[in-house]
């Protein structure tokens, strides 16, 4: 069981050993192993996996309590259609290098341990197997995010844990044509990788209910056969999206600014 008091050595994405070869294009990503390898979504692009019962209700409640704890940093940032906060590496914009403002707390490291135990990894070796950034999104009922691609700043493997309410994630071709929808249940794990990551966009429509069909019908929870044609969004949904950046990170915002100033001075 995940615990707020879990004693786990925090992984440091800044000081961790570098891999023997760069993992920029994702060509060195290890394959998924059991039990996650058995969760392939059949009616969707390859390398889309769904685990409906990744977390127990008790573990999900513990995670939500930690996320909303007043003692937990970072603070929320209000965006269009959602609130968000980032643990680990914050990707730089423009020529600003990535930085680490808020390292993974022990309770988040415990969840990463659970991901690795399920057969998920971002690289070879103990250090590079782990993700180094986690984006926490909060969607109120009726909110969503437009179709988008995560881009080359990350390795082509994304793991999303859903808490609270449910919603449908829609995969869209880059031309804008819809491809399929995946129902994300509370406590579930979704993994987007390789083709599903690189060749398609994904988003959540801003609505209060989602309609079938769902590409992951056969992988839904125990009552999958009773899944209604329309699934209402009845509760606020919180998602934790784990990725690994392809860029090195500096320690914090101050170091990021210093590195940027030094870079400009060197070009003079």
Image: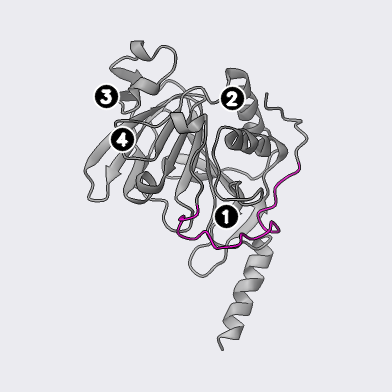
Res. 55 visible in picture:
yes
- As drawn, the label of residue 172 is none
* Residue at left offset 49%, top offset 61%: 24
The residue sitting at 52% across, 59% down in the picture is 23
| Location of the N terminus (image quadrant) | top right
Q: SS at mark 1?
A: strand
CA–CA distance between discs 2 and 4? 27 Å
Which class describes the residues within 10 Å of circle 1: few (<14), some (14-19), or many (20+)? many
Dot 4 or dot 1, earlier in sequence: 4
Residue 8, above or below 174: above
Of callouts 2 and 3, the N-terminal one: 2
Residue 113 in the image, given as x and y percentages of width and height? 64, 36
Q: Report the disc number at residue 213.
A: 3
How far is the residue under mark 1 from the one under mark 3? 36 Å
Q: Quadrant of residue 27?
A: bottom left
With 44 as the anchor, is 266 left or right in this view?
right
Q: State the mark number for residue 44.
A: 4
On residue 90, the disc is 1
Q: Main secondary structure of the magenta part?
A: loop
Nearer to us of marks 1 and 3 is 3
């Amino acid at each position: 069981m995940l615990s707020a008091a879990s004693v786990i050595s925090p992984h440091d994405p800044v000081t961790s050993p570098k891999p023997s070869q760069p993992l920029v294009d994702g060509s060195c990503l290890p394959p998924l192993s059991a039990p996650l390898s058995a969760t392939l979504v059949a009616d969707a692009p390859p390398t889309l996996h769904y685990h409906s019962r990744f977390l127990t209700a008790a573990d999900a409640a513990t995670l939500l309590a930690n996320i909303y704890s007043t003692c937990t940093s970072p603070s929320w940032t209000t965006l269009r259609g959602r609130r968000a906060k980032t643990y680990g590496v914050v990707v730089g914009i423009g020529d600003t290098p990535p930085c680490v403002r808020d390292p993974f707390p022990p309770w988040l490291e415990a969840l990463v341990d659970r991901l690795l135990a399920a057969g998920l990894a971002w690289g070879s070796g103990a250090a590079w197997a782990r993700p180094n950034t986690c984006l926490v999104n909060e969607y109120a009922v009726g909110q969503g995010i437009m179709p988008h691609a995560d881009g080359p700043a990350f390795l082509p493997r994304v793991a999303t844990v859903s808490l609270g309410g449910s919603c449908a994630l829609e995969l869209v071709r880059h031309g804008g044509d819809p491809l399929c929808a995946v129902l994300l249940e509370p406590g579930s794990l979704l993994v987007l990788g390789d083709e599903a990551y690189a060749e398609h966009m994904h988003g959540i429509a801003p609505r209060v209910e989602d309609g079938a069909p769902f590409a992951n019908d056969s992988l839904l929870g125990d009552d999958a056969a009773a899944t209604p044609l329309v699934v209402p969004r009845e509760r606020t949904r919180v998602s934790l999206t784990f990725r690994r950046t392809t860029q090195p990170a500096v320690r914090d915002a101050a170091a990021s600014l210093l590195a940027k100033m030094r870079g400009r001075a060197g070009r003079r």
